[in-house]
Image (cartoon, rainbow, N blue to C red):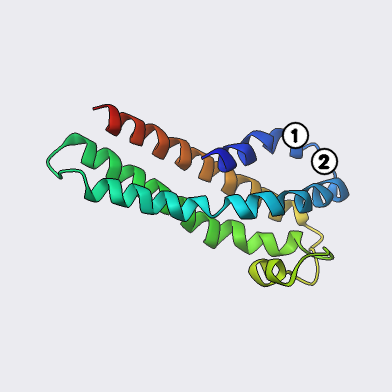
Amino acid sequence: MALSLAHALELPGKYRLDRDAYLAIQSVYYPGFTVGGVSEPLAILAALALLLATPSDDPPFWLTFVALLALIAMRLIFWLVTQRVNKFWFVGQNATALSLQFFGAASWIPDNWTVLRDRWEYSHLARAILAVTAFVLLLVAIKI
């Protein structure tokens, strides 16, 4: 949740940046967020384990189930929206072969870069909302 929330909280400040500043800032994030991104599949597995350990006739089961769906939706948004835009932020970056393979760097950034910015930023906002929702649901499920 922390990584998604961090992206969402930086959105207002990043909207004040011009193209060059925005592209420079984007390349700063990747090392830490890429490493931290491994936590999302682990969160899905942990929520699934919790769901399987919860009796289906208990209210916490359904709270956990919805939390699991939110976590899965986060991953889907990443792969279907965010990741497709990531490759544009890698244009001209000095990155490792593994990073370039993962992000699949594009060869150019379109003139209407703000469309990509908006898609990237709002996908992270949606992911943050889903992450907070999953976190709260899991907290409530554990407390019931």
**Residue at (46% x, 55% y) in the render:** 41
Mark identifier at residue 13: 1
Q: How far apart in space, not on screen, are marks 2 and 1 (Cα)? A: 7 Å
CB atoms of marks 2 and 1 within 8 Å:
yes
Q: What residue type is labelled 1?
A: Gly
**Label 1, residues with CA under 10 Å away: few <14, some 14-19, many ≥20:** few
Q: Specify whether 37 is left or right of 51.
A: right
Q: Which residue lies furthest to the right in this view?
A: 20
Q: Is mark 2 on a helix, strand or loop?
A: loop
**Residue at (47% x, 58% y) in the render:** 76
**Residue at (46% x, 35% y) in the render:** 132
**Residue at (62% x, 37% y) in the render:** 6
Instruction: Please tell me which residue lies in front, 129 or 40.
Output: 40
**Label 2, residues with CA under 10 Å away: few <14, some 14-19, many ≥20:** few
Q: Is 69 located above or below residue 1 in the figure?
A: below
Q: Which residue is under mark 2?
A: 17
